[in-house]
Amino acid sequence: MSKKKNKNRIIVNQREIDLLNKYYEIDNENRIVTMPLHYDKASDLINGKIVSKDNYLFDYDELTSINDMIKRVPFMYKININIQIDDYEDYDPDKLLSGFNDAMELNQYNYQRERKNNFLKAGLLLVVGISILFAIAYAKLNGWFGESKAAEVYSEIFDIFGWVFIWECVTVAFLTPSELGVSGNMFKLRVMNVSFYDIENKLLCSEHLGDQAKKWETEKRVELASKWSLLISGIGFLAMGVMGAISTVTSISDLVSIINEIATASDVIALVLVVFLEVLIAALDILGGVAALARYNGRVILRKFSYIFAGLLIIISIIIAVVNFGTAQYMISTLATIIISILYIFGLISNRIVNRTKEENKE
């Protein structure tokens, strides 16, 4: 197969370039493809379901069609899109160009929202998967299933369920491509200029897409850090809360056994206190996780509770760690709780700063 090497030592398929050159104007030296698109009427480009006297939103299907054509051009080539319309039907070419840019920008915001929702779904799937695996491990450790063959089968089935949720989490978060994201990045990275021409091939308006893309409101580093902190802490708290609730079952069982047996009042009080703290921490973890994920998703709930919860959880965890100093289980749990709580507090504070900054900019 014929290959071609340009001055920057990039190898391309010459046969592919020759085929594209039959339909597009190609500048091989500067690696630019001019893509002429022809339409009979301006209304063919407009989303007819959205009616506005002053603005015309570009049709999403047309954007998708143009994006499909862009994919056929080798990635190392930049693209100029020349749109020729025979009859503008009294539509303003500048507003058509503005409608094209608006449609691209709206797609970008939809992609950001879609990506955020996907990470939230993935986080919840991860919590379910980890909780199932933890419950199975805990049940085996305490002999809940017994020693029969049926118990082994049940254990394996639930173990598979847990891993299915975890793999689904990975699929939703990382392995499922977003058409909106691919399309937006394709236009931003590859398209140089979008121009409109009349039936006589006279240039009516043109704009550099890179300049337009700079106007798009992208998430700042602080905002991204806030969202990731809230997402990670929310998932962590939910997972710890569910696992804490599962482990509390054993403590309650021990408490019932001690009460039924001959035991001193101090033993019963000590175990009741332990069970109470475990239930309290599990409930606080779950509430904190729900509050963090709600804030991540743009909803503010339990506002006053959030900061009190984080501080209270750290204090309780430290007390338990001091009482059980040297016990690896409690030390690891305390360290994880403190780290997640710090992420949670950082996410709350930075989220509040970001929201306040946006409100000030609106004014």
Image (cartoon, rainbow, N blue to C red):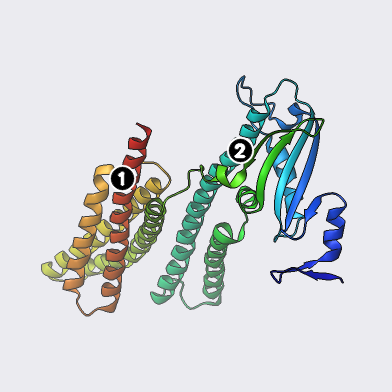
- The quarter of the picture where residue 229 lies is bottom left
| Amino acid type for the residue under numbered disc 1 | Arg
SS state under label 2: helix
| Amino acid type for the residue under numbered disc 2 | Asn
Quadrant (top left, top right, bottom left, bottom right) of the C terminus? top left
Asked if 157 appears above or below 39 in the picture, the reply is below
> Which residue sits at x=60%, y=21%?
54
Q: Position of residue 254 (x, y in %)?
A: 27, 69
**Label ID, residue 335:** none
Q: Position of residue 323 (x, y in %)?
A: 16, 72
The residue where tag 2 is placed is 101
Mark 2 or 1: in front is: 2
In the foreground, 249 or 32: 32
The residue where tag 1 is placed is 352
Quadrant (top left, top right, bottom left, bottom right) of the N terminus? bottom right
In the image, farthest residue toward the bottom? 326
**Badge 2: how crowded within 10 Å, few (<14), some, or many (20+)?**
many
> Which residue sits at x=43%, y=45%?
297
- The quarter of the picture where residue 108 lies is top right
